[in-house]
Image (spheres, rainbow, N blue to C red):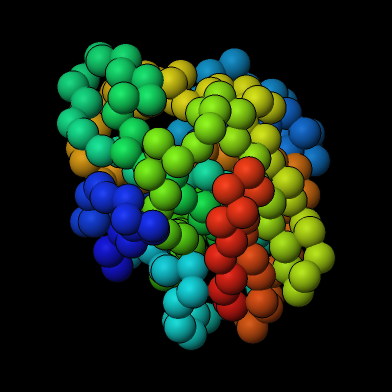
Amino acid sequence: MRIEWQDGGSGPTEPGTIYCIGRNYAEHAAELGNAVPTEPVVFLKSRAALRPLAGGPLAYPAETFHHEAEIVLVIGRAVALGDEPGWDAVAGLALGLDLTRREVQNQLKTQGLPWTTAKSFAGAAVLGPAVAKTRFPDLAHITFDFAVGGVTKQTGDTRLMLFPVPVIVAHLARSHALEPGDLIYTGTPAGVGPLARGDAFALRFTQLGAHWSGRL
Ligand code: MG
C-alpha cells in the first residue's frame, strides 16, 4: 500500500521499514505484566503486513487479535547513522493499529523466542492517512483515542510516553540509517484488548478533530 496524506499534506508515499516501539507507556507495560524498560524496546513488522485503516477484507486466517492503537511517525528525510535530528526527521503522523496475536506472543515470550509471528502477518500493521506535522499545535503534547463499536477503549497522550519521539528517532538511528517513508509505530497506551474480524473501529487525533473509521 501507499502512504496516504490528508488535507493537502505531503511527504513520502512509498512505505519503507516498519519500526515498532514496545512498552512505551508505563500503564500498558504494567497491564501485560512487563517491567518498565530502561531503553526503547524495538521490533519490526514486514511491509507486507501493512493494511489501510479503511481497508477491505482481512486476508489473515485468524478471527481475533489484540488492538494496540498507536501514533505512527512517517520519516520525511534521510537520517544518517548516529544522527539525532529530533522532530526534523518526521514529515507527518498517522494513527494505526499494531495488531497482535497475544496468545502467540505470550507463548513466544515464555519460550524466550522472537515475537515476529505474533506481530508481523498480513494486515498486522493497520495504517491511517498521514497528517502533516505542522498541523499539530504542540508536538510535545498530542492526544488520540481508539474506539470499538462506538465505545472508547484506549486514550493516548504523548506526554505519558516513556521515550518521546526525539529519543525514539535517535535510538533507532544509533543502529540504522533511516530513510524517507520509514514508519515508526510509537507504542500503545493502556487498554489493549480483543478486536475481532468484522468489528468496526475508529481512531481520532482528538485535538484536531481528525477521525477515521475502519472495519477489521
Ligand atoms: Mg505496539
Q: Quadrant of the C terminus?
A: bottom right
Specify whether 151 is left or right of 39. Answer: right
**Residue 6: x, y in percent?**
39, 58
Specify whether 82 is left or right of 126. Answer: left
**Residue 160: x, y in percent?**
68, 27
Q: Residue at x 79, y 59 (%)?
A: 152
Specify whether 13 is left or right of 212. Answer: left
Q: Residue at x 73, y 68 (%)?
A: 148
Decide which of 104, 47 is in the foreground and name it. 47
**Residue 144: x, y in percent?**
64, 46
Is 141 situated above or below 12? above
Is 38 situated above or below 48? above
- Can residue 23 be seen in this snapshot? no
Decide which of 83, 88 is in the foreground and name it. 88
Decide which of 74, 142 is in the foreground and name it. 142
Q: Residue at x 18, y 22 (%)?
A: 80
Q: Residue at x 43, y 21 (%)?
A: 166
Q: Quadrant of the N terminus?
A: bottom left
Decide which of 199, 99 is in the foreground and name it. 199
**For residue 85, what is the image quadrant?**
top left
**For residue 188, what is the image quadrant?**
top right
Is 35 situated above or below 133? above
Is 190 situated above or below 121? above
